[in-house]
Image (cartoon, coloured by chain):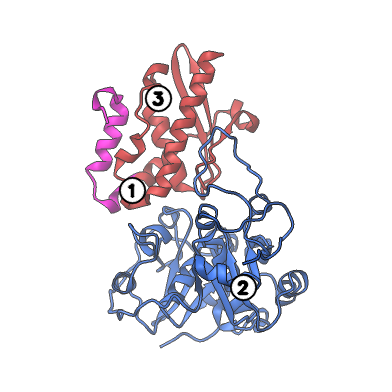
Amino acid sequence: MSAEFDSAAKFAEYAHPERLVSTAWLAEHLGEPGLVVVESDEDVLLYETGHIPGAVKIDWHTDLNDPVVRDYVDAEQFAALLGSKGIARDTTVVVYGDKNNWWAAYALWVFTLFGHEDVRLLDGGRDLWIAEGRELTTDASDVTPVEYPVVERDDRAVRAFKDDVLAHLGNPLIDVRSPEEYTGERTTAPAYPEEGALRAGHIPTAASVPWARAAAGDGTFKSRAELDAIYRDEVGLADGDDIVAYCRIGERSSHTWFVLQHLLGFENVRNYDGSWTEWGSAVRVPIVTGAERGEVPGR
Amino acid sequence: MEQTTLPPALAEIRDDFLALGVRDRLQLLLEFSNELPALPERYADHPDLLERVEECQSPVFIFVEVADGVVHLFATAPAESPTTRGFASILVQGLAGLSVQEVLDIPADYPQSLGLAEAVSPLRVRGMTGMLARTKRQLRERVAA
């Protein structure tokens, strides 16, 4: 059973309006059977300080990542997690979070790896909900565990690995990190440890589009026309393109993946979650520094 | 870790965390977060004096003061970053009243001893490790100056 779609005019402009709900829609539908609201934040404690009534928490680190291998949880773990949150396979899931839905989009992307069909984002996320003075609570949510089927993850459609990216060179790549990370400048003082990567710069030919450019000032997604102006007119993406987005560990690029796939309707978009923390430390992969995109290296 | 060198307040905080289950450790961290004192006015008006802890994803700033041989750690982080505030609060409370040498002697891996890796993730705990390391570095600079 799935909840009705939000018919807001703004969403109708997007390729897949059914992937978004507004704060007004959510306030109206809270507590409906078949709908589970999930909060997913950068900060693991933010949910505890107050959340949307009835919402459950899913943490990107402690719930969605495998604790040992650098990978996502497996089918059994995912089924156990969702079942424990009261989510069934046909439940409508609305995800929201802090920082323009950065981590919420990451959670939505992981749900997509497992083929959960009806998963949507709350446009504007946690910050807009709060800014509008809507209700938050620290009361524990009343959850009735359900059975979630064990469904194998499918990493082919929306996930790219390092070798996929090497083979992909020559096709559009979007680097969604900050301009400083893109050019390869070091922003931290030399004496400080910098976690992550041994080399700085970007993957050859990648276009720099910091992820937050897709968000308006209030944390909602920019309009269809504004997004088209960035990704089609400025970057040069065109229908039929095979696109890979990356950042540092694949979280910010989940947000861009959502924009390209669901709002602009590109059909072949993958998120490279290994991202710079893998690429920037891998041996002999090509890297470009500076503001230019660079050329595809000869093979 | 050499338990003999750990100041009593830090040892007590560690024991409090380890006595709890994973879920309750998160609640205790939230309590610490709520207890982080506001900055004294002399720092609130001078953000330039504060040092940003780059190891934390959230903006957190610290400043170390030494008065009559006693260390005072000040920290500020936004309400939207309760985990980071919790880490800072643990250090502010745990370091209160210690001498310079006692702070410098705190084992660098103290944050890893709180049993938070499972509740919060090792990556996030690293933010607290960075905070402690920067506190010690600032102290060495103050003492050398």
Q: What's the magenta region?
A: B1-28
Image coords of residue A73 (percent x, y): 35, 67
Residue lying furthest front: A299
Residue at position x 40%, y 55% in the image: A48
Q: Which residue is mark 2?
A: A259
As rendered, which of B144 and A157 lies closer to the eye? A157
Residue type, numbered disc 1:
Ala
Q: Give the CA separation, mark 3 to mark 2.
A: 48 Å
- Mark number, residue B96: 3
Chain B colour?
A: red
Residue at position x 70%, y 75% in the image: A237
As rendered, which of A171 and A45 lies closer to the eye? A171
Q: Give the CA separation, mark 1 to mark 3.
A: 25 Å
Is disc 3 placed on a helix, strand or loop?
Answer: loop
- Image quarter of residue A155: bottom left
Q: Is residue A124 visible?
A: no
Q: Determine crowd level at label 2: few under 14, some 14-19, many 20+ residues with C-alpha closer than 10 A.
A: many
Q: Are marks 3 and 2 on the same chain?
A: no
Chain bearing mark 1 = B
- Mark number, residue B117: 1
Residue type, numbered disc 2:
Val
Image coords of residue B84 (percent x, y): 46, 44
Q: Quadrant of the C terminus of chain A?
A: bottom right
Q: Determine crowd level at label 3: few under 14, some 14-19, many 20+ residues with C-alpha closer than 10 A.
A: some
